[in-house]
Amino acid sequence: MNKSIPEITLNDGVTLPVIGFGTYNLNGNEGANAINSAIDVGYRLIDTAYNYENEGTVGEAVRRSSVPRTDLRITSKLPGRYQTYDKAVPTIQESLYRANLDYYDLYLIHWPNPKQDNYVEAWQALVDAKKWGLVRSIGVCNFLPEHMERLEKETGVMPSINQIELHPFFNQEQQRKWHEENNVKTESWSPLARANTVLQNETIKKIADHHNKSISQVILRWHYQLGAIPIPKSASPKRQLENISIFDFTLDDTEMSTIATLTRPDGRNKDQDPATYEEF
């Protein structure tokens, strides 16, 4: 692993860097070049999903890289339309075939899709896939506490990680507290928010100016100090390096509290509430 980036240990013993690289909309040769660039500048945790339709692109970037596969942590995710057990198992296998990888380090259920109510079946497929060596660690995305409690009650296995929407406008304080109390790590999707408004936020800009850092760096440092793993995305090598360069300064308690005040009840970017949203 890249020792310049701290690591955390999941509840099953698998280690992850505290910051990763998102790959949504990075496809084809340009996408492979962007992901390979990210690996070159120091990222070791790479996030993809079946529904991103770029698992093959991620696999190609891994093959192009001079970094050993064992030093990388590759994540993918199961889509909602394949959550029954008999569909989930071959879909996990198909994910590996697409990427031409022997295993995923982390495999997640993308959304709970509570109306379908198949997520426990899907979870059992992930539990078995881990036993078979197809994946090293298993987790979820966008699950509420009651969903994860049900997984543990019915299968005996708690997710190692929950990837959730998390940014200064939606800081998920109660969800993060539950994760901490139940030894589930928090991973942040859309860590800089999808809208560019956060990157012009005057409150964060004042903090950034004080540290002589960019707004993005302050936000990503905020995630790190919350104990969350952000997965920012950029095709620009310069921005990739900027986003990963967050370990030479610290936000004080007042600055962390100030950023916390930016959260709002309607802070979700696309109103995707896991209690009702369905992803296929």
Image: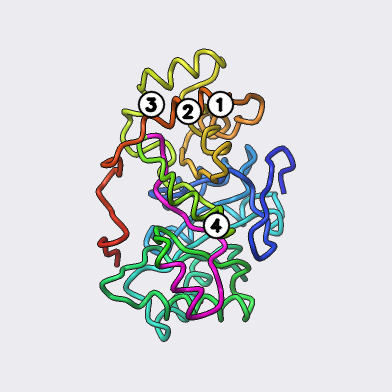
Res. 199 mark = 3
Q: Which residue is mark 4?
A: 60
Local crowd size for mark 1, using a 10 Å CA cut-off: few (<14), some (14–19), many (≥20): few
Residue 55 percent coordinates (x, y): 47, 61
> Dot 4: what SS?
helix
Question: Which one is nearer the viewer's eye here, 154 or 239?
Answer: 154
Magenta residues (range):
147-168
Residue furthest to the bottom:
86
> Dot 3: what SS?
helix
Query: For the residues carrying marks 2 and 3, which lies nearer the camera in this image?
Result: 2
Find out whether residue 162 is within the magenta segment.
yes
Identify the image quadrant of residue 10.
bottom right
Res. 253 mark = 1
The amino acid type found where label 1 is placed reads Asp
Task: Report the Cα–Cα distance between label 4 and label 3.
Answer: 32 Å
The amino acid type found where label 3 is placed reads Leu
Q: Residue at x 53, y 28 (%)?
A: 238
Res. 156 mark = none
- 33, above or below 207, in the image: below
Check contact, mark 2 vs mark 1: CB within 8 A: yes
The amino acid type found where label 4 is placed reads Glu
Q: Nearer the N terminus, badge 2 or badge 4?
A: 4
Task: Report the Cα–Cα distance between label 1 and label 3.
Answer: 21 Å
Question: Which one is nearer the viewer's eye here, 84 or 56?
Answer: 84
Q: Which residue is mark 2?
A: 257
Q: Residue at x 45, y 67 (%)?
A: 148
Local crowd size for mark 3, using a 10 Å CA cut-off: few (<14), some (14–19), many (≥20): some
